[in-house]
Image: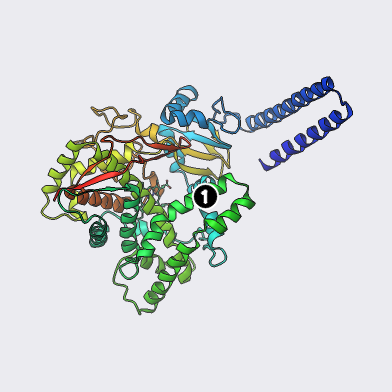
Amino acid sequence: MIVNQQRYNDISGILTTTSNFLLNYYNNDRRRFFVTATSIFVTTYTLWKLVRKQKSSIHEKYPNIVPSVSGALPMFGHGLKISKDPLGFIQQCKAEYGPAFKIKLMTQDYYVLTGKLIPEFVMASRKTVSFTDGIETIMPVERVMKLSYEHKHTEEIVNPRDKHPITYPIKQNFKPNQIEVFSDRIEKAFLEMLHDELNLKRGEKKQIDPWDFLSHAISRISCLCFAGSRVGTNRELISSMATLTQNIVKAGMLLTVLPPMIADMIVRRYMSVERQLDLLMKLLVPLINGLRSGEIPDDEPTFVSMTSKLPKADGSMRSPEDAAFHFKGVALASIHTTSHFTTFALHELACRPQLMADLRQEIATLDQRTPESVSHLPLLDSFLREVLRYDIDNLGLHHMALQDLVLSTGQVIPKGSLIVAALNEAHYDPALAPPSDTPLNVFDPYRYLNVKEDKASSTIGIDMISFGLGAHACPGRYFAVNEIKYVLAELLVRFNISTPSGKRGPDTFALGMAKFPPKENIILECIV
Ligand code: HEM
């Protein structure tokens, strides 16, 4: 790509110089017009030849390459079309080009895989595709970290032979039969949040920005469960972790649109997350030192204690700084995602009074409300699964092809390409889901009640890819669904939930890809 860009620049440079020379030489209006028109024609023709040559060389190398969708505009690619009707555009491409096709959004090519082809890349080995590299292409998280903190701490490069210091502890300790150890802390953190922020009298109302409220509530829970009682109640840590992802996303967006030198300078100076990372290190490094020396008793299961006890493949222990720094990884994986879907859930509830009444009735059957007891309620679980299914991104699960990927259709995705899953399209495809009375493009919170198969909110499959699929599917999903259901149950029994407009507001899409909840506030009216 860089070589081609250089060639374009060279050719345009030569053409510009030549036409300037001719213009100076023939100082006459008719000739000026003639020279300009000829220059434009020659430039266009040369560029067209170059693009064709590049295309034909790709086709020579890969005769069965995944087809490109026509009609990409200069600069925007298919951006305008997909933004107008995100799902409709993908469905139309699938109907015209088959289950795999290539689109262009702004300057980036995306190989879109639909339906049954999705597992072929999501479940492929990490030697073939990389989730981290895929995400980094569209959202340079690592670059933001480096720009913000490289002068103080360099992120550990995890040896492929090591047990991964973020994924391994979560995979090993957050299984459905293990997460009970977090219940008291989930309960404590959320009840304290309600006490501090929503201490209303019966009949009193308060408008909240649900995203802001929930990201702080989820951050309280995460800090207490993942860092532990000794540091996890620190208000500054909670608020830093609640906004860390948003700050990184903002800085990351700037890095993708501005020239590197300018963008790096702006991020370093004005958008750095250094302060948040400083705080994290200040609190967690002494905690890890204390746990290791035995000065602090290791009496509470936390992500920090799990990761700091995990030896490397050669038997050595990672430094307390390296172990502490991994906390931001779990904060990034868990807080934004969980708050995002809980915000959608509140908006779905706000426009459905009957559903709220049915859920309250179900919750009232419990002797005690705990994350455990609430997790077994069938309607609440069916509702959450429907939120995870219906309110999904249009395109997601970005993976980078580290090798040529040959699909079961025989088509090839070349090494170095960015692959995405048509998540929304798959979740709305009747061929992939069990038969249902309600069409899949309709939100039906009762959909999974009384179905024969296991359709729990944490059960993944081609009809539920919000947590990914296969070996790399989200290992925190059992924790996440318990946490979300508990938060919703506590809100439902205390408040009537509505919106100022009385309706469910429209979703917003970023570049036709990511789907965000309505921007409208939520009104909470105390009913107890
Ligand atoms: C509703 C909330 C959540 C959603 C929608 C979600 C979704 C996802 C998705 C789509 C992936 C990528 C799977 C892939 O590579 O194909 C993932 C990975 C991951 N998630 Fe979650 N997640 C959520 C909550 C959490 C929580 C609460 C934790 C921690 C307790 C967590 C920890 C992780 C980790 C460590 C990975 C990396 C797994 C790997 O690379 O093998 N997630 N998550």
Instruction: Look at the numbered disc 1 and give the secondary structure of its residue.
Output: helix
Label total for image: 1
Residue found 34% across the figure and 56% down from its top: 216
Residue 434 screen position, x and y as percent? 28, 31
Residue found 86% across the figure and 31% down from its top: 24
Query: As rendered, which of 263 and 523 lies closer to the eye?
Result: 523
Residue 299 screen position, x and y as percent? 29, 72
Q: Is residue 509 left or right of residue 61?
A: left
Image quadrant holding the N terminus, namely: top right
Residue 380 screen position, x and y as percent? 21, 44
Q: Is residue 493 left or right of residue 214?
A: left
Query: As rendered, which of 143 and 102 lies closer to the eye?
Result: 143
Q: Quadrant of residue 428?
A: top left
Q: Is residue 118 left or right of residue 194?
A: right
Asked whether residue 9 appears in the rendered view, the answer is yes
Indicate the colouring scheme: rainbow
Disc 1 designates what residue? 252
Q: Amino acid at mark 1?
A: Gly
Farthest residue toward the top? 30
Residue found 47% across the figure and 30% down from its top: 82
Asked whether residue 312 appears in the rendered view, the answer is no
In this view, 1 is above or below 489:
above
Residue 53 screen position, x and y as percent? 70, 29
For disc 1, the neighbor class at 10 Å (few under 14, some 14 to 19, many from 20) is many
